[in-house]
Image (cartoon, rainbow, N blue to C red):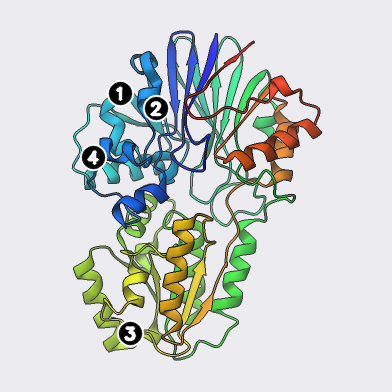
Amino acid sequence: MIEIRAIGGYNEVGKNMTAIRIDDEVIICDIGVHLENYIRLTDDDDLLEVSAEDLTKVGAIPDISTLGNWKELVKAIIPTHAHLDHVGALPFLINSFHCDVICTPFTAEVIKGMIAVERIKTHNKIRTLHINSCLKITKNITVEFINVTHSTPQTALLAIHTKYGTILYANDFKFDLYPTLGKKPDFERLENLGNVLAIVVDSTYAKDERKMPSESVAKQMMKDILLGTHSKGKAIVVTTFSSHLARLKTVLEFSEKLGRKVVFLGRSLEKYIRAGEHTGIISFSKHSEIVSFRRKINKKLREIMEKGKEKYVLVVTGHQGEPKAILSRMAKGETPFKFSKEDFIVFSCKVIPTQLNAENRNALEEELKKTGVRLFKDIHVSGHSAREDLKDLLIMIKPKNVIPAHCSKEMKEGMAELCYEMGYKKENIRLIRDGDTTVIQS
């Protein structure tokens, strides 16, 4: 018998965690933080030393008490990619389990970096499984990583193969035919999966009636800003998701064409760049400088002001307006860097639509506007599938049951509407909430 229990990410976007029980063995898929609740508690966008109890109380990490007696049956924790809302709770919860963590090499490097920063000692091994590879977890369970595109490297769709059939965990992904880093999705493997009993599927943009644009579109948008706008003599400051190595690669490429040196500033940027370099995905250090700690950042910004800020492109943390991130501190005059009229600020992101993010970004933009800078916003495409991508996935794998995840109530309803349009019956669309368990019949 197969049962799927929603631990986190089924009431809202964030703190993703799903438990899949096959007879008397359990696989945990993802174990992430809810970033808004985390930032509300800490005022920071990077992981800091906070107790698991405090984080659970404020809804920043999944409540693993809902696992009940399943907790002792867990055979593996499998994060599908390196975003904090899928992997960020591991440092706080890893020692609650007695099993291996299995993930791609890049994700493993990010996890090891988080654990090292937190000085956590763990008995759990972190094992790597390459994309398009399989691993036998137990006699009755084999897992497979299927290549897919997303806004961080080595993202996998997780196929859990059992004697009853296959469960596909598809959280997060998009179908990018023209990726700027990494390979295209493995459509052939998806079409040949066969007997997919259920899919747990990213439904964030299920109501968005389009195909999500390629990352190559965002690259062209960035090119238009950096190479197609008059920036001579002006500072250029870019902020984006630290985990988005493809976007960072684009910034580096066009900065070199401008003849400017790139300086990456911030702990989370260093964490993801180092992970990418250790796994051979990128080699940014050859062409840029990476500075992480506050004292060193202030020293570097002082040096940049002395040498001429027009010689650099600064990539900094703080795209959502997080109060303690680098860009907010620069805007408030808390660093040696001083903005001048018509300096460039490029927000290569969108504002994640929560009240806290909206308030923080608005406050940041108001501070920046006081300095007379030019703001370039929404230079971005999402890493999530929109409605037409989701439809393609369902056509390819023909799952018997659909379980919307990574979603609010409204997003979940959007995924259900899509399934109804495609002929699914109500009983085969499992609209579960955190704490719920659904049984999958073979």
Which residue sits at x=22%, y=44%? Answer: 116
What secondary structure is found at the residue carrying circle 1? loop
Decide which of tag 1 and tag 2 comes sooner along the chain.
2
The CA distance from mark 1 to mark 4 is 16 Å
Earlier in the chain: of badge 2 and badge 3, it is: 2
Q: Are marks 2 and 3 in contact (CB under 8 Å)?
A: no
Say which of marks 2 and 3 sits in front.
3
Q: Is residue 376 above or below residue 47?
A: below
Sequence-earlier tag: 1 or 4: 4
Task: List x then y, in percent, for residue 388.
Answer: 74, 44
**Label number found at residue 338:** 3
State the mark number for residue 154.
Answer: none
Marks 1 and 2: CB-CB under 8 Å?
yes
358 or 94: which is nearer to us? 358
Q: What residue is shown with label 4?
A: 51
Q: Secondary structure at mark 3?
A: loop
Q: CA distance from mark 3 to mark 1?
A: 48 Å
